[in-house]
């Protein structure tokens, strides 16, 4: 089955139970789902391609894309330096199910990772975060993340080796960790907690991010869960000049 028939059938097969929802909304919801799953690893498709893929008119595609552009998930600015914008208008978007990989791609930038370390280790501090015995063997992956060939973040992730050893043979230079976690290990994160703190970079951190010492950055600590169990502890340092978080709220 081709990608085209898959996307179209996904949207149209839901029509029977969602008659109250217009077609553009069903396309929008499916695109948002696919962004979260890191499906657009090469580039976000254009309006014509999406029109063919979903078998709908271009005006329907534009209506579906407008909220994604307003939310910053799809870049709409021309002639400006792109900035990764992660919008958390939905509480479920702020957490481990969201991927920096997807954010860079959705912003229209090319991305790659430089793997510094991918190994088995023992780290009592992280084991405690994962609610595991101190001597538990962990898969440790350390990377530098690039957007349009410029360093945007450094990233360290730990996962229990008995569940995630399949990640050791993965080439993460152009691949999302969460996608590979599902593909190689059968684990899909469905919740967790994330803390974002504004910091000032020290000399070592600035060197890793290739920016002046004393620059602003975000430090993100994340515990990802699957079926209620902690399966990932991650620490990410993101350049403050290349990253923004937008939050929506309502009377509810």
Image (spheres, rainbow, N blue to C red):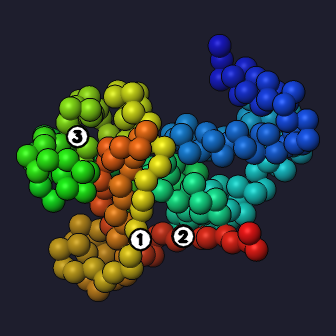
Instruction: Give the spatial CA distance, label 1 vs label 2.
Output: 10 Å
Residue beneath disc 1: 196
Which SS class for mark 3? strand
Of circles 1 and 3, which is in front?
3
Alpha-carbon neighbours of circle 2 within 10 Å: few (<14), some, or many (≥20)?
few
Instruction: Give the spatial CA distance, label 1 vs label 3.
Output: 23 Å
For residue 224, the mark is: none
Q: Are marks 1 and 2 in contact (CB under 8 Å)?
A: yes
Q: Is residue 89 depicted above or below 63 in this figure?
A: below
Of residues 75 and 250, the one nearer the viewer is 250
- Quarter of the figure that contains the N terminus: top right
For residue 245, the mark is: 2
For residue 160, the mark is: 3
- Quarter of the figure that contains the C terminus: bottom right
Of circles 1 and 2, which is in front?
1
Which numbered disc, 1 or 3, marks the residue that appears first in the sequence? 3
On the image, the x and y values in percent for residue 199 come to 33, 81
Residue at 91 percent across and 41 percent down: it is 20
Asked which quadrant contains residue 119, the reply is top left
Residue at 72 percent across and 63 percent down: it is 70
Q: Is residue 47 depicted above or below 149 in this figure?
A: above
On the image, the x and y values in percent for residue 236 come to 33, 62
On the image, the x and y values in percent for residue 150 come to 38, 62
Which SS class for mark 1? strand
Instruction: Give the spatial CA distance, label 2 vs label 3.
Output: 30 Å
Which numbered disc, 1 or 2, marks the residue that appears first in the sequence? 1
Answer yes or no: is residue 154 visible. Answer: no
Asked which quadrant contains residue 148, the reply is bottom left
């Amino acid at each position: 089955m081709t990608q085209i028939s898959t996307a179209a059938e996904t949207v149209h097969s839901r029509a029977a139970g969602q008659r109250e929802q217009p077609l553009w909304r069903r396309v929008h919801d499916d695109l948002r789902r696919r962004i979260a799953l890191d499906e657009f690893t090469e580039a976000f498709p254009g309006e014509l391609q999406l029109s063919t893929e979903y078998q709908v008119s271009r005006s329907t595609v534009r209506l579906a894309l407008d909220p994604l552009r307003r939310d910053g998930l799809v870049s709409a600015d021309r002639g400006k330096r792109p900035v990764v914008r992660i919008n958390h208008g939905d509480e479920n978007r702020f957490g481990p199910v969201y991927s920096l990989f997807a954010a860079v791609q959705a912003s229209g930038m090319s991305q790659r990772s430089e793997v510094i370390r991918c190994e088995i280790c023992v780290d009592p501090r992280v084991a405690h975060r994962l609610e595991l015995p101190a001597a538990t063997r962990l898969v440790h992956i350390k990377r530098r993340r690039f957007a349009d060939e410029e360093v945007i973040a450094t990233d360290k992730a730990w996962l229990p080796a008995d569940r995630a050893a399949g990640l050791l043979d993965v080439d993460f230079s152009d691949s999302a960790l969460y996608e590979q976690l599902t593909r190689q290990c059968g684990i899909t994160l469905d919740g967790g907690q994330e803390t974002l703190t504004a910091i000032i970079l020290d000399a070592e951190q600035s060197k890793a991010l290739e920016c002046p010492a004393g620059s602003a950055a975000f430090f993100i600590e994340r515990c990802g869960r699957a079926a209620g169990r902690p399966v990932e502890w991650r620490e990410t340092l993101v350049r403050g000049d290349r990253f923004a978080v937008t939050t929506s709220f309502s009377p509810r």
